[in-house]
Every structure is written in C-alpha cells, then in structure tokens.
C-alpha cells in the first residue's frame, strides 16, 4: 500500500475513534446535542470518504487477493 492509503486509513480510524468517544461520553442515553450531531456527521463523512477512496483505489487488488484465498481453500477441501 502507498503512503496516501496509509494516511487515509489513519484518518478513517481517527474519525471512528472520535465517533466512539462521542458515544462513550453520552452513555447510557446517547442523547447527542445539536453540536455533537454535527461533529458526528462530519466524522462519519470523513470515515466514509476515506474508506471509499481506499476501497476504490485498491478494488482490483483486493478482489484478486480474495479470489486467490478462495482457490487456496478450495484446494485444501479437495485433499
């Protein structure tokens, strides 16, 4: 993976950590304020954008890896 992918991964993870922190701070009722809802929206958008970019940029490689693993498992089942 390239540096851009690693940076997007870190950004997506950080956004998800921020989301988790919002939920932790609002346990057990999860009643977010208007401001917290705006923050949640921005963090969700950031995570989705970065994850989508990572997935789209590496789709072919990821699918090829998945097919290779399937073939390996099929080969083990036949033995």
Image (tube, helix red, strand yellow):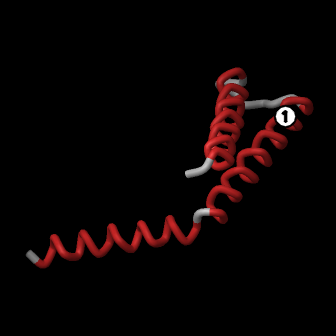
Judged left or right of residue 67, residue 57 is: right
Q: Nearer the viewer, residue 45 or 60?
A: 60
Closer-to-camera residue (30/10): 10
Q: Position of residue 59 (x, y in %)?
A: 58, 68
Left or right position of 78 against 24: left
Task: Give the quarter of the image for residue 36.
Answer: top right
User: Which residue is painted at 64% across and 49% down in the image?
Assistant: 5
Q: Is residue 54 above or below residue 22?
A: below
Q: Where 57 falls versus 16 (above or below)? A: below
Residue at image point 88% right, 37% down: 38
Instruction: Determine which quarter of the picture holds residue 71.
Output: bottom left
Q: Given the current orientation, which residue lies at the most extreme top position? A: 25
Asked if residue 5 is positioned above or below residue 61 in the image, the reply reads: above
View extreme (bottom): residue: 78
Percent x, y of residue 53: 70, 58
The x, y position of residue 68, in whole percent, is 35, 71
Q: Position of residue 6 (x, y in %)?
A: 61, 43
Residue linked to disc 1 = 39
At 60% from the left and 50% from the top, the residue drawn is: 2
Residue furthest to the right: 34
Number of numbered discs visible in the structure rendering: 1
Circle 1 Cα neighbour tier, 10 Å, few/some/many (<14 / 14–19 / ≥20): some
Q: Residue at x 91, y 30 (%)?
A: 35
* 45 displayed left or right of 58: right
Figure quadrant of the C terminus: bottom left
Q: Secondary structure at mark 1?
A: helix
Please name whichever residue, 27 or 76, is drawn nearer the observer in this view of the structure. Answer: 76
Taking the view exactly as shown, the residue that stands out farthest to the front is: 2
């Amino acid at each position: 993976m390239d540096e851009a992918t690693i940076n997007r991964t870190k950004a997506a993870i950080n956004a998800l950590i921020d989301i988790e922190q919002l939920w932790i701070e609002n346990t057990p009722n999860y009643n977010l304020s208007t401001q917290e809802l705006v923050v949640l929206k921005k963090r969700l958008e950031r995570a989705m954008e970065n994850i989508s970019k990572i997935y789209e940029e590496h789709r072919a490689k990821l699918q090829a890896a998945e097919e290779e693993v399937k073939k390996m498992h099929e080969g083990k089942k036949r033995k």
